[in-house]
Amino acid sequence: KAVTPDQIESVGTSLLLANTYHLYLRPGHKIVKDQGGLHKFMNWPGPILTDSGGFQVFSLSDRNVIDDDGVTFYSHIDGSSHRFNPETSIEIQNSLGADIIMAFDQCPDPYGRENNEKAIARTHNWAVRCQEAHSRPDQALFGIVQGGVFPDLREESARFISQLDLPGNAIGGLSVGETKEELRSMTQIVTNILPSNKPRYLMGLGSPVDLVNAVASGVDMFDCVLPTRLARNAAAMTRTKQLNMKKVMYANDKNPIDEKCTCYCCKNFTRAYIRHLCKAKEILGATLLTIHNLHMLHMLMKDIRKAILNEKFDVWQDEFLKSIEL
C-alpha cells in the first residue's frame, strides 16, 4: 500500500506476497486469471508468493465453522458465506499464478493443547490434499508446520511436512502473541528438523531483532505487514528502535530519519517535513515512510547475507544485539 512497483523494486525488494483470501473476494481469482495472472495484472516483473488464505479465514471472523474438510467463513466485506478447503485454495492460487504458493493450513491459538492437536492433524491431511490437487509444475508448493508452543507437536509437524518432500517448507502459527522465548525455541525446534537444502520460511515476522534471531536459527525467508503498516501509522523503523514521527520533538528537526540510511526518504527529506506530512495526513507521508522502512529491512538482510558469506555472522549478530540493548 502507498507505493508503486517501481518504488518497491528501488528499495531492494525481489519477492512480493499477495493475499489469496483478499484477491478471492475482490476482484476475484477468475478475473486475475483472465488478466494474465498476477504478474501481468499488477505489472510486477519479479517473483510472487501467495499465502493460502487460511490465516485470514481463521482470524477475520469468529463466526467461521471449521471441520475436517475445510472451513465455512463469512466475508469481512459484505458478510456473504464462502467455503475454503485445500482443493479450493490450490485452485485459487493456481489461477492467480504466483511462483510460490502455500498449502492450506489451520492456524489456531498457540496455547490450547487440544486445539493444536486437531489443527496439526488437519494441517497434515490438508497438505497432502494440496499436493494432490496442485496442477502447475511452474509453481512451487510449500508445506506449513504448525503446533503452537508445544515442542512435541512442533517436532511431529516438522517431520510430517518434511517427508512430503515439497520444494520449500514454512513455519506457521508463530509471531501471533507468544513470548519471544517461545518464538525462538519453537523456531529452533522446527529448523533442526526441516531440511537445510530447501527454503525455510517463517511466516509473519518483521522486526529487526526477530529477523536476526530467526536467521541465527536457520530461517531463510520472511514476510510481514509490519514495515508498511507502521509507515501508514507514522512510525519509522530503524535497526535499534521505532520513531513516532508525529511527536512534537521532530517539528523543527533538520535531520533525516536515520543519518546512516541511504533511502530516497532519508537522502531528501527532514524529520520535520515527514512529521508535517503525517500530522496533515498527506499520503506522501505514508509513501516516504514505507520506502524508508522497506529499505531499512532490505539493507539489514543484505548485511546479514554478507556476514554469512564471510563466515562472520556470529560476530555480526553479537554486535547487532549489543546495539539494540543500548
Image (cartoon, rainbow, N blue to C red):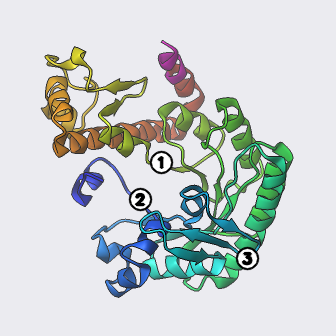
What percent of the width, then of the height, locates residue 179? 66, 32
Q: Residues within 10 Å of mark 3 (few under 14, many from 20)?
A: few
Q: Amino acid at mark 3?
A: Asp
Query: What residue is pinned by disc 1?
Result: 224
Q: Residue at x 27, y 38 (%)?
A: 289
Is residue 321 found inside the magenta-colored segment of the image?
yes
Quadrant housing residue 231: top left
The reply, left or right, for residue 221 in relation to residue 183 is: left
Viewer-proximal residue among 157 and 77: 77
Viewer-proximal residue among 223 and 314: 223
Query: What residue is pinned by disc 3?
Result: 69
Q: Amino acid at mark 2?
A: Leu
Q: Residue at x 27, y 27 (%)?
A: 245
**Secondary-structure class at tag 1:** loop
Of mark 3 and mark 2, the one earlier in the sequence is 2
Q: Is residue 64 above or below residue 238?
A: below
Q: Is residue 33 visible?
A: yes
What percent of the width, then of the height, locates residue 152? 86, 47
The reply, left or right, for residue 258 in relation to residue 275 is: right
Of mark 2 and mark 1, the one earlier in the sequence is 2
Of mark 1 and mark 3, the one earlier in the sequence is 3
Magenta region: which residues?
320-326
Query: What residue is pinned by disc 2?
Result: 15
What percent of the width, then of the height, locates residue 89? 58, 75
Q: Amino acid at mark 1?
A: Cys
